[in-house]
Amino acid sequence: MISFFRENAPAPLKGALRRMAYLVLETGAALSGREDFTPPGWLPLIGDGDFKGVGEEFFRYFLDWGGLQPDEAVLDVGCGLGRMALPLTRHLDPDRGHYSGFDIDDRAIRWCQRRISKRHPHFQFQHADLFSREYHLT
């Protein structure tokens, strides 16, 4: 039955059902009080590897090679779903440090604003309305 649906259902219907399933999972996580910053699968994840693991690896680079201090500002060009931002929430001082990220994917930006900026107001995400053949969906 599932394979028949996968092969024959129109793509918009499959996408809508997938988004509804992830919405149920996100709602369950929110109601349980669990803080989970892993983006839902229906949002486009750019880049390979484990979402949190890659962010943690780059976080070490920011500290070890870049000497990033808690009172500094970070500009993240092409921030996507906040892979680099998440570990920085533990490092940048809420009163003296600041993070600004922008991306052309407005869905990713809205997700970051709802999930990250809500808990960390010194982390700001902005949609950059630019055209890209690779990422522009309309």
Image: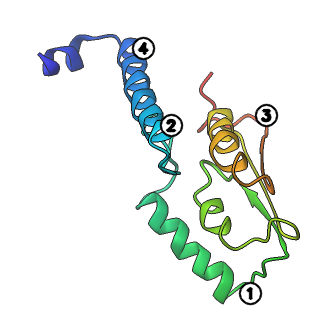
What distance separates the C-alpha of mark 1 from that of mark 4?
46 Å
Residue in the image at 59% along x and 81% along y: 60
Residue reaching furthest to the right: 96
Q: Assign a secondary structure to mark 2.
A: loop
In the rendered image, which residue does mark 1 sit on? Answer: 67
Instruction: Give the numbered dot on residue 129.
Output: 3
Q: Amino acid at mark 4?
A: Pro
Q: Residue at x 63, y 31 (%)?
A: 136
Residue 38 x/y as whole percent: 48, 50
**How many residues crowd around disc 1 within 10 Å: few (fewer than 14), some, or many (20 or more)?**
few
Mark closer to the observer (1, 3):
1
Asked if residue 63 is positioned above or below residue 95 in the image, the reply reads below
Q: CA distance from mark 2 to mark 3?
A: 18 Å
Q: Is residue 44 above or below residue 63?
A: above
* Inter-mark Cα distance, 4 to 2: 15 Å
**Between 35 and 54, which is closer to the camera in this rendering?**
35
Q: Circles 3 and 4: CB distance less than 8 Å?
A: no
First reached walking from the N terminus: tag 3 or tag 4 = 4
Mark number, residue 43: 2
Q: Are marks 4 and 2 in contact (CB under 8 Å)?
A: no
